[in-house]
Image (spheres, rainbow, N blue to C red):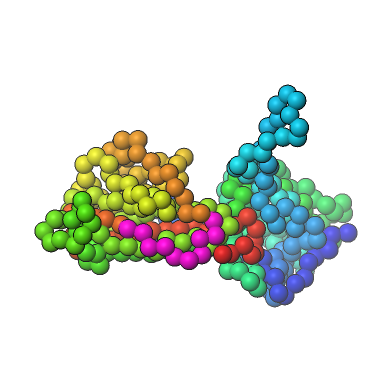
Amino acid sequence: MAICLTNPGRIMQLILRDNTAGSPTFGHDLIVLDLLGPRGGEQGIHLLEGSWDDLWHAPITQVRESWAYQEGSTLDDIPRVNERLCTLKLGTIGRTTRAWEEIDDLLWRVLGPGWDCYLRAFSEISEPRELRMRWEKAPKPLTQRDPGRTKALAWEVPTLSVDPYWYAPELSFAIKRSQMVEINPTTGAPQSGTGVWQGTIPMLNRADVECWPQYASNGLEADTVVWLPDGLSGNTVAVPAIGALGPGKEFLIRTYPLDETLLVRDDSQEWANMNGVAFESAIPAGTGSPVQVPIRIQGGTANTTITAYYSQRYTRFMGGEA
């Protein structure tokens, strides 16, 4: 028999969010289903017993090698992080057959095979975190009786999270050129008239997974080159590496090595001006104390603003903060 979980101290929600770029409601939560907590099941959708097994820790496989005549094996420095496959057990129940049908339909409007939804978990010791998921296979009913008679149905839902991490709220820090000091680009000492400004922003990552920062500008009003920190390595990377970004441009820099580094809002080919230059250093996990890192701007205006974004990725839905 499927048992509905009750725990007023543990809130869990299933969320349909608008991920359509350019939509007026982009990033907004369209439907929020309360599965657990003080309001758990109020919409007729419940989290059932047996749903927790795969939600705790990210699935990790230790990579190791062994050679002929070797005793034991040799462990690789970097474990393999796999996709997360979870099996959620959800129940739908209504006061009438029509009410149950509407509630069951609502569940599949949120959780389906062709789009992602978010499982949000609250904790007493951590900020809320979210796991992105969709169907991995079609759900299977766990009850054999006609739900039209029972007005209830229990489902076993295999879900897929290609990104296996739980995400806490992102951290961001911004700096304007007007907050910087004009410097000698060779020595870094303050010097007027050089057209190069430098300031610092805090860099930190409280999470238990490394962070690859992203950087964005506001709409540029003059030719601009920006030097951004390469993690905590002490090095900087020029953006773009060739030439400058002209007025009207607005850019996003993604430092993760497998992503296209430079994106410009006008869909121009500015990314080619990075000339194969890449960021090499992430912010290590557990960097709880802010480290001041330099950002440098050549050109631009006093209003030119650079914002740094630090995703907070965790292997589990609670704990792990530095």
Of 90 and 214, nearer the camera is: 214
Image quadrant occupied by the C terminus: bottom right
**Image spot of residue 42 (x, y percent):** 70, 71
Q: Residue 205, relative to residue 126: is it above or below?
A: above
Residue at the spot 51% in from the left edge and 54% down from the top edge? 284
Residue at the spot 75% in from the left edge and 58% down from the top edge? 52
Q: Which residues are magenta?
A: 285-294
Secondary structure predominantly adopted by residues drawn in magenta: strand
Q: Is residue 257 magenta?
A: no
**Image spot of residue 201 (x, y percent):** 35, 63
Q: Is residue 287 magenta?
A: yes
Residue at the spot 63% in from the left edge and 55% down from the top edge? 315
Q: Is residue 2 left or right of residue 40?
A: right
Residue at the spot 32% in from the left edge and 62% down from the top edge? 200
Q: Which residue occupies the extreme left position in the image?
A: 193
**Image spot of residue 191 (x, y percent):** 15, 61
